[in-house]
Image (spheres, rainbow, N blue to C red):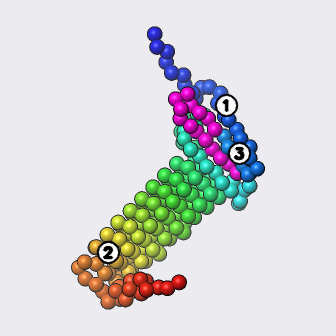
Amino acid sequence: MATAPTNMLLKEVKYKVDQTMWGQWSRFLYPDGRLFEEYVSHMTVIGLPLIHITRGICPETGKSRTAKGFLAIGRFAYGVIAIGQVSVGVIAIGQAALSLLFGLGQATVGLVAIGQFGGGIAFGMGQISTGLVAIGQFACGYYAFGQMGLGIHVWDVRHAAPAAVEFFKGLATLKA
């Protein structure tokens, strides 16, 4: 007779803990080979760990743990610089990224946003983009450049507004 698998959430979790000069790694290896690990730096900035990294499913909760730090890396990440499947930060990189200044991801929103959907306030670039300046297959902005554009000064396959042509050609010739 087969026994039912044990519920890991009801057991005491014994992590393998490694202290380094810079921070602490906590790891847990499930019986089936899956790994959970978390790194938290000793140094803090504005009350957050300088670096917080999470990976895998937490054995205590059965869910992904959210990374929260100045630099946060994990499936869910919140920080000044956030990198994750879902990320929120001043700078956010992820599949779904909500940023204050710069966002990069599949669907991203921020002052400057680059992604498949780039919902920018000042600048957006992507398949679908918005912003004061928008570049994309479908671009919506004050200056819009794309296959299909919507805005005040538009350069698309249907027509090229002189102000849009001058603006985007000027962007192309900027030198450092």
- How many residues crowd around disc 1 within 10 Å: few (fewer than 14), some, or many (20 or more)? few
* In the image, farthest residue toward the top: 1
- Rendered position, 163 above or below 112: below
- Rendered position, 170 above or below 114: below
- Rendered position, 152 above or below 26: below
- How many residues crowd around disc 3 within 10 Å: few (fewer than 14), some, or many (20 or more)? some
Say which label, 3 or 1, has the lower sequence index: 1
- The location of residue 85, given as percent across then percent down, is 49, 52
**Residue 42 horizontal side relative to residue 76, left or right:** right
Residue that label 1 marks = 14
Instruction: Give the residue type at disc 3.
Output: Gln
Q: CA–CA distance between discs 3 and 2? A: 48 Å
Instruction: Give the residue type at disc 1.
Output: Lys
Residue placed at 35% from the left, 85% from the top?
Answer: 164
Instruction: Say if residue 44 shows up in the picture.
Output: yes
Say which label, 2 or 1, has the lower sequence index: 1
- Circles 3 and 2, Cβ within 8 Å, touching? The answer is no
Q: Look at the image and say whether residue 72 sits in the magenta stretch.
A: no
Residue that label 3 marks = 24
Q: Nearer the viewer, residue 110 or 173?
A: 173
Residue that label 2 marks = 146
Tell me the magenta residue range. Answer: 27-42
- The location of residue 157, given as percent across then percent down, is 25, 78
* In the image, farthest residue toward the left: 158
